[in-house]
Image: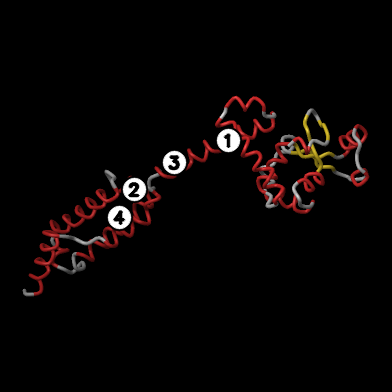
């Protein structure tokens, strides 16, 4: 972003907010809004400098400051890194082109690592931060994918299984439900089928991402084969007694 090199401040290439807005085809208000929307991400002294008081007086005295800034109570100077970060989030053609140029440099470095040495320190820092961010996002994604349900969520599955067992056994007043051995077979069958379907060794190891699907599975579960016949036979004995 050498075309944005306007001033030198504390050894860094910086530009004013107005110059940043002009370069990205927008206005000061849009730059302000973009800053406020990301205020916790922009770091003073790293992405920008807010000059006022004696610092502002020294800056005006040492630089050729244009008339519209001469009497400004505060001047915001954006570093090259700060300018790139604005380009990432501003929705203008000029900002898009600037960020696309950064992306091109990124892939040029990937395809030809020796090209990394030719980049400016600011751009190198952006690549480094981008790499770290990707690593963090990848780690978070892996944690989310592997995170298992907590105690409260385990209770939800247990309650759903109890309710479903009562239903398929014909209610608590049914002969099938009164048969503790048959009732135990139903619970065992529910969890055996559940573990096979979700490929877990215990319902407690159900992934959080699968919780909703797990609840639906239990609600839709039905006994099959011999177990179904045993339930029907038990309840039919009550009907004819």
Instruction: Choose the circle earlier in sequence order: 4 or 2.
Output: 4
Q: Nearer the viewer, mark 2 or mark 1?
A: 1
Q: Are marks 2 and 3 in contact (CB under 8 Å)?
A: no
C-alpha separation, residue under disc 1 versus residue under disc 3: 28 Å
SS of the residue under disc 1: helix
Instruction: Choose the circle earlier in sequence order: 2 or 3.
Output: 3
Find disc 4 in the rendering and name its residue: 158
Instruction: Choose the circle earlier in sequence order: 1 or 3.
Output: 1
C-alpha separation, residue under disc 2 versus residue under disc 3: 14 Å
**Quadrant including the C terminus:** bottom left
Q: Are marks 3 and 4 in contact (CB under 8 Å)?
A: no
- Report the residue at 62% width, 39% height from top: 103
**In the rendering, at what x and y percent does residue 140 appear?**
48, 41
**In the rendering, at what x and y percent does residue 123 appear?**
67, 33
Identify which residue, 166 or 54, lies in the foreground.
54
C-alpha separation, residue under disc 2 versus residue under disc 1: 39 Å
C-alpha separation, residue under disc 3 versus residue under disc 4: 24 Å
Report the side of 152 relative to 69 (left or right). Answer: left
**In the rendering, at what x and y percent does residue 177 appear?**
17, 63
Find disc 3 in the rendering and name its residue: 143
The vertical placement of 26 against 229, above or below, is above
C-alpha separation, residue under disc 4 versus residue under disc 2: 12 Å
Find disc 2 in the rendering and name its residue: 206
């Amino acid at each position: 972003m050498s075309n944005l090199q306007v001033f030198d401040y504390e050894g860094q290439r910086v530009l004013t907010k107005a110059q940043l807005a002009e370069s990205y085809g927008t206005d000061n208000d849009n730059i302000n809004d973009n800053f406020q929307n990301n205020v916790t991400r922009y770091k003073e002294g790293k992405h920008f400098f807010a000059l006022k008081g004696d610092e502002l007086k020294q800056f005006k005295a040492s630089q050729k400051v244009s008339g519209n800034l001469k009497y400004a109570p505060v001047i915001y100077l954006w570093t090259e890194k700060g300018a790139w970060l604005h380009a990432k989030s501003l929705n203008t053609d000029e900002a898009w082109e600037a960020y696309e140029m950064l992306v091109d440099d990124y892939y040029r470095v990937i395809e030809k690592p020796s090209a990394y040495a030719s980049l400016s320190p600011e751009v190198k820092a952006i690549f480094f931060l981008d790499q770290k961010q990707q690593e963090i996002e990848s780690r978070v994604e892996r944690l989310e994918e592997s995170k298992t349900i907590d105690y409260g969520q385990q209770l939800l599955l247990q309650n759903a299984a109890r309710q479903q067992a009562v239903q398929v056994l014909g209610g608590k007043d049914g002969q099938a439900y009164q048969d503790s051995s048959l009732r135990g077979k139903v619970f065992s069958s529910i969890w055996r089928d559940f573990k096979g379907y979700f490929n877990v060794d215990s319902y407690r190891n159900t992934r959080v991402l699968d919780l909703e699907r797990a609840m639906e599975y239990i609600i839709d579960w039905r006994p099959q084969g011999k177990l179904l016949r045993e339930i029907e036979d038990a309840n039919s004995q009550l009907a004819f007694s």
